[in-house]
Image: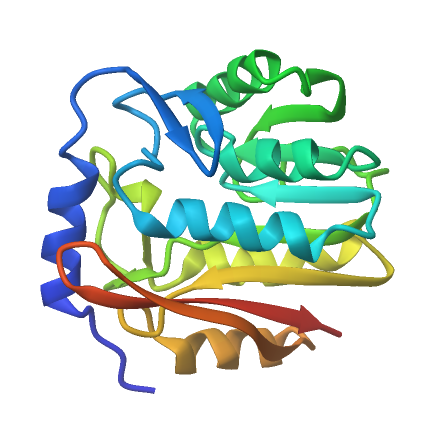
Amino acid sequence: MNISPKKQFVDSTRELINSSTTSREVIISGVSIFTDPDVFNPSVFFSSEWFANRISELVKDESTLIEVGSGSGIVSIKSAIKNPQLHVYATDINSKAAELTKINAEKNDVSNRISSYSGDVLDAIPDFIKADSVFWAMPFGFLDPTDVLGGRDSQVFDPGYRAIKKFFATARRYLKDNGRLLIGFSVDIGHYELLEQISHDYGFTLKLLNQTKGIEKDSVSMEIYEARQ
């Protein structure tokens, strides 16, 4: 499969993720949270609010959610606020993000139902946790496999989709018998055909659940896919 970075989106996304220079308080989907310049800023990307709204609806009948790449915690917090029966296990490779998720969970009085960890993909989640759903707004910005991430690149880019491959390889152990993966993606910015191939290689089938369009630097699509074994 001949896959190469979509340079226009790589450049514009890098500009956006580096635009935040100060910590501040923002309102996303009716939820007040603190941001940090070294953590993915949900006020910069329209997708953050959309994912928070959609995921909080998709898990309405569930008891356990794992969120990978929690960032400031907006998806985890919105889901916990809207679903009082839900416990969320949030994790992020960035230790500052894991701490910010804790702070924002306390700020919104849901810290008793959000557990925050720091580690690569699902590495930090305790083995005994079994979820109804595992959500990840993936770093779908494709870079060449030999590229080295620098600065804030890991927030949105994944060279060769290495982290995405690891996610599919390890996610099964954290799912209940009828559990599912919920995947935030963009066919405009990412490479869907590669995502589909990776999911198939690890025994998952993708199904489109939601789709929208919005403006970042350009008009881009966002989707939520369900992956089941």
| 53 is higher (above) or lower (below) than 2 | above
Regarding residue 71, the answer to whether it shows in the image is yes
| 3 is higher (above) or lower (below) than 48 | below
**Residue in front for this viewpoint, 86 or 91:** 86
On screen, residue 170 versus residue 9, left or right, reads right
Residue 85 at x, y percent in the picture: 84, 36
In the rendered image, which quarter contains the N terminus? bottom left
In the rendered image, which quarter contains the C terminus? bottom right
On screen, residue 81 versus residue 31, left or right, reads right
Regarding residue 125, the answer to whether it shows in the image is no
Residue 115 at x, y percent in the picture: 69, 24
Name which quarter of the figure residue 112 lies in.
top right
On screen, residue 144 versus residue 104, left or right, reads left
Q: Which residue is outermost to the right?
A: 177
Residue at image coords 49%, 52%: 51
**Residue in front for this viewpoint, 5 or 188:** 188
Residue at image coords 20%, 16%: 22
Residue at image coords 25%, 35%: 152
Residue at image coords 43%, 58%: 162
Residue 144 at x, y percent in the picture: 23, 64
Residue 14 at x, y percent in the picture: 15, 46
Name which quarter of the figure residue 160 lies in.
bottom left
Q: Which residue is outermost to the front?
A: 30
